[in-house]
Amino acid sequence: MRRAAGVWKQNVAHSDATGGTAVAISFDMTTPGIHESEQQLADGGRSMTVERFDPDRKGITPAVLLLHGADGLRHRGPIYRTMARHLAGHGLSVLIPHYFERTGTTGYPSLSRPMDFLGWMEAVGDVIRSAGPGPTGLVGFSLGAYLALAAAGHEERVGAVVACCGGLPPLLAAGFTRMPPVLVLHGERDAVVPVSEARALEDWLRQRGTTNEVVIYLDQGHSLHGPAADDALKRTTAFLRRHLLAVV
């Protein structure tokens, strides 16, 4: 486990094999070399918005899903989109699923709503399967980190996970059939998801022999600021490129 001085704060149409349909409803290019689009992904129930940030390059590009926390995208959406553009600029296709839309969830949900959580897992699985060929990475924040690990425990296409300020979903972990390499990022003073969750996750990964990196940021809480945020973004980018680009 590494400790560093110092979630994320910066200034800042086809059918798939599962039968779901993704229909592009808008398209824009706001950053040179990055194509931004928005899709609606439906699978017999509620539709779900998926934002895409694709690098302007030929060939297969690994996909990365950014999974927001319990506050959704209303307040931190610009932060997630800034990160998406950064990752797209480093050769990764980034998708931001509005997974609350699949279950009609509003407000600040928690893990005490198991049926919603299972619905979000299904939504993430649909996005993974519609993302195109190649491996997929998952980057989750708080609630999204729990969701990322839950999905990675079953989805064979997931090749890497970054869990920021989250932990292992205890009721689901016993049924996991796999786990790809995991990068764990957490603040020592996190008052929302205690750092003990990160340490428990690290122990679980080591017991399974799963490749992992764990960084605990001193003097940081549930959001990383300043140099800690910069370091976390650099580590995330390098981790995803190392585990995803090497296999395409």
Image (cartoon, rainbow, N blue to C red):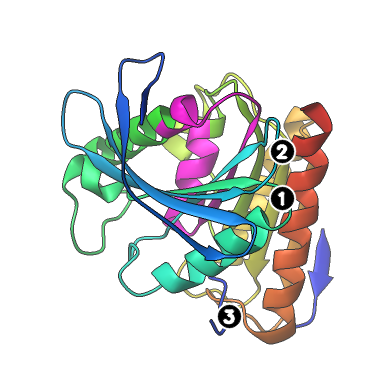
Q: Is residue 220 left or right of residue 108?
A: right
User: Pointers 3 and 1 in contact (CB under 8 A)?
Assistant: no
Foreground of the two, 83 or 55: 55
- Identify the disc placed on residue 183: 1
* Residue 35 x, y percent position in the rendering: 53, 53
Whether 135 is among the magenta residues is yes
Q: Within 10 angstroms of label 3, few (less than 14), some, or many (20 or more) residues?
A: some
Question: In the picture, residue 25 is in which quadrant?
Answer: top left
* Image disc number at residue 154: none
Q: Position of residue 26 (x, y in %)?
A: 32, 51
Q: Quick one: label 2, few (<14), some, or many (20+) residues within 10 Å?
A: some
What amino acid is at disc 1?
Leu
Identify which residue is drawn at 74% across, 56% down.
Answer: 237
- Give the residue number, with chain letter if any, for mark 2: 205
Task: Place residue 82 in its image quadrant.
Answer: bottom right
Tell me: 246 left or right of 65: right
Part of the protein shown in magenta? 127-151
